[in-house]
Image (spheres, rainbow, N blue to C red):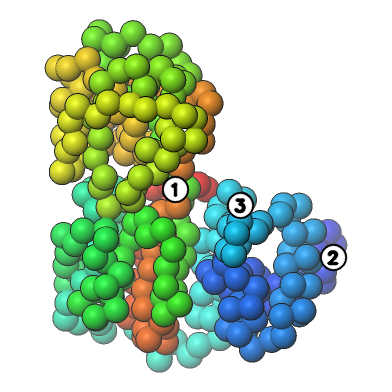
Amino acid sequence: MNNADLALFRRLDLNLLVAFDALVTERNVTRAATRLHLGQPAVSAALARLREMFGDELLYREGAAMVPTARALELAPRVRALLDEVRLMTTPAERFDPARLAGEVRLALNDPLEALLLPGLTARLRELAPRLDLRVQPIPASQQLDRLDAGEIRLAVGYFGEARAVHDEQALHVARFVCVFNPALVRLDAPVTLAQVATLPNIHTSYGGEGPGLVDRAFARARLKRRVVVRTATPLSIPFVLRRSPFVALVPELMTPLFGGLADLRFAPLADAEVEFPVSMVSHRRDRSDPLVGFLRREVAGVAAEVFGAG
C-alpha cells in the first residue's frame, strides 16, 4: 500500500458506508437513523459527507420519499458486499460453513431473471454448499412480498416498487428499456422515440421484473398513447412473435442476451425517455442474522454483479 492509499484510508470512515447502506435501504433519513441507533442530525450529516465523498447527490427527495440516484444504485451492491466481507472477517470462521448447509431453500425469480441468474447461482451453490437444494418458486410479482412475509420463500429478486418496513432490500441493477423489432418488417432508425413507438402495434408483457405500468407511465408523461395488440404471459415469447409480425416491443436491456440467438432482430435505444427500474433483492428482516439467508444474499449479489456488471 503506497502513501496515497494510506492517505485515502485515513480519510475514509467505514461508518459512512454503514450509513450509506442504511440510507439506500430505508430511503428515509428518520428510518435510517432508527436502524443505526443514531439521531437524525447525525445521519443527515453523514449523508452530506457521503455526497462530498462520492461527488453525487446519492439520494434526492421526491414527495415523502428519498430516491437513490443511478450512482447510488450502482454503489449499493458493492458497498453491501464490502460490509458483508468486513462482517465475515470479524466473525470466527467456525460459526458458519456453507458446506454444512443441508435441506431446501426457496426463492422467487421471474422467468428472465431465472434464466440470467440461476446458472451462475447453481454453479456457486454446487461448489460452496453442495448439500443445499434450491427451489425457484413461480410466484407472481404482486404476491412475492406476501409470500416472503409468510415465510414461504426466503429471498425474492425482481422489481417491487417499494419494499415494506419489515424487509431488507438491496439494489442489484438499474434496468433500462430498449425497443426491439424485426428490421425486415418494421422500418426504424436508432435511437427510437416514444412517438415512433406509439405509431406502431406493440407487444407487451407485465412480467415480474418490470412491474405494472412503468412503460405506460412513460407514454402518459409524453402525452402519447400506444396500441398494445398482444399482451403475453411471459416475455420469452416476444422475440418469436416479432420475427413474424410487424410489431415493436419495449423490453429491459438485461433481457437482450436471452434473444441473442435471433440475429434478425434489432435492439434500439430510446432517444427521448429513460424508462428504467431497479432490480432488487429482498429478504425479511427476521432473517437478518440467519447465516443461510446471509450466504444466499451474498451469492445472489455476486452472480448479479457478474451478469449485470456495474449496472
Q: Tell me the quarter of the picture where residue 298 sits.
A: bottom left
Residue 2 visible in the snapshot: no
Question: Which of pointers 2 and 3 lies earlier in the amino acid sequence?
Answer: 2
**Residue 49 or 210: which is nearer the viewer?**
210
- What whole-number distance in Å separates the C-alpha atoms at marks 2 and 3? 28 Å
Nearer to us: label 1 or label 2? 1
Q: Amino acid at mark 3?
A: Thr
Amino acid carrying mark 2 in the image: Ala
**In 3D space, how far apart are the residues under numbered discs 1 and 3 (Cα atoms)?**
12 Å
Measuring 33% from the left and 8% from the top, which residue is drawn there?
187
Q: Is residue 203 above or below residue 132?
A: above
Vertical arrangement, residue 285 with respect to residue 62, above or below: below
**Label 2: element kind:** helix
Q: Residue at x 51, y 23 (%)?
A: 271
Q: Residue at x 46, y 42 (%)?
A: 276
Q: Which residue is mark 2?
A: 7
Q: Earlier in the sequence, mark 1 or mark 2?
A: 2
Find numbered disc 1 in the image and state the secondary structure of the residue it sits on.
strand
Q: Which residue is mark 3?
A: 69
Q: Residues within 10 Å of mark 2 (few under 14, many from 20)?
A: few
